[in-house]
Image (tube, rainbow, N blue to C red):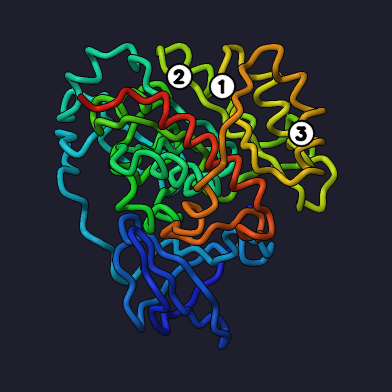
Amino acid sequence: MVRWRAGVVAGVRRRWRGAVELSVTVDGVATRALAYPELVGEPEPGDRVLLNVNAQLMGLGTGGYALVVALPDRLPPDPPGAGTDRDGGHVVKARYTPLQAIVRGVEEPSSPHHAAIAAADTLAGMPVVTADLHSALPAIAAGIHADRPAARIAYVMTDGGALPAWFSRTLDGLRDRLVGTVTVGQAFGGDLEAVTTHSGLLAARYALGADVAVVAQGPGNLGAGLPWAFSGVAVGEAVNAAGALGGQAVGALRISAADPRERHRGISHHSLTAYGRVALVPCDLPLPDGLEAPLAARVEEQIADLSVRHRIVRVPSEGLDAALRASPVPLSTMGRGLDADHGYFLTAAAAGRHAAALAVQPS
């Protein structure tokens, strides 16, 4: 199950918040590796490293790195508050794996947010935008800020993709656009940690003070080509969570005219499954008016089934293209940029614009 290698750090290639990309020499060959200093310590040239090379040997497009498992000759010190009194928290994530992480959840009595979360059981109408791909996040944020540049956006990262939030360079680049990230379920490494999507949404509202929350899995989703065999199907459960807590769920449909796979043309079969079968409470499904004619025609044929339960909202697209092009991070989905898959990003931005319109205006 794990392909192990040993190597030596030759140098640091680049770093972003929570992660360091390294050049590691393995059997005389330079190898691209990734380390999370919070887990393994800070690698330095000359350090011997133990690597998991599964993703690299599989050639994964999203994360084809060798992953640093340990610096065996220079172990990091215990983190602060890691004594027997559990001041550092007692929520375990990536549970019962060799690198299980102990974090402080917002729900715990030792958390400064415990009282607020314990007293809350409603989102009080806060809009919650749900998306099945991490790549939608910057486009949704662009759509929100196109009309409300001061809106406070929180990202609730679920555990369908990467578990460490640190893996995402997008999150690093959006730091000035978000009030924070809440990692939920088995995901970890956000500004706040929560046990479930439900308490993560409450944390977004009451701990981070968000006007709008965006729920999506981390990068590197898992899919096997079947409607039910895709980690992003859980976006339907996020709609249910938002509805159960009195939020206003807004679904960012996955729409494409460029995907070479027929099942993803128009509205992806994943969106049709998540919103049509998994989401049991109504949500708003925004459609921008600027889709190219062939794509728009196909979407109109597919949307009928979703309109039985959900509200289809027509959103003007004026200004959204400019907002997308001003994104502080590159826009990319399945290797396609904004111009290559314009409909995908425009639809995500339209969901953001609609959520901004639903958010309670500041007094």
Task: Determine which residue is flagged by label 1.
Answer: 284
Gap in Å between the C-alphas at discs 2 and 1? 8 Å
* CB within 8 Å, label 1 to label 3: no
Q: Quadrant of residue 313?
A: top right
On the image, the x and y values in percent for residue 64 come to: 60, 64
On the image, the x and y values in percent for residue 114 come to: 20, 23
Q: Which circle marks residue 215 in the picture?
A: none
Marks 3, 2: nearer the viewer: 3
Q: Is residue 211 above or below residue 225?
A: above
* CB within 8 Å, label 2 to label 1: yes
Gap in Å between the C-alphas at discs 1 and 3? 16 Å
Residue type marked 1: Asp
Front residue (pair 31, 284)? 284
Secondary structure category for the residue under label 3: helix
Residue type marked 3: Val
**Within 10 Å of the Cα at label 3, are there few (<14), some (14-19), or many (20+) other Cα atoms?**
many
Secondary structure category for the residue under label 2: strand
Task: Determine which residue is flagged by label 2.
Answer: 248
* CB within 8 Å, label 3 to label 2: no
**Within 10 Å of the Cα at label 2, are there few (<14), some (14-19), or many (20+) other Cα atoms?**
many
Q: Quadrant of residue 288?
A: top right
Gap in Å between the C-alphas at discs 3 and 2? 23 Å
Front residue (pair 218, 345)? 345
Q: Which circle marks residue 299 in the picture?
A: 3
Residue 2 left/right relative to 324: right
On the image, the x and y values in percent for residue 325 come to: 50, 59
Residue type marked 2: Gln
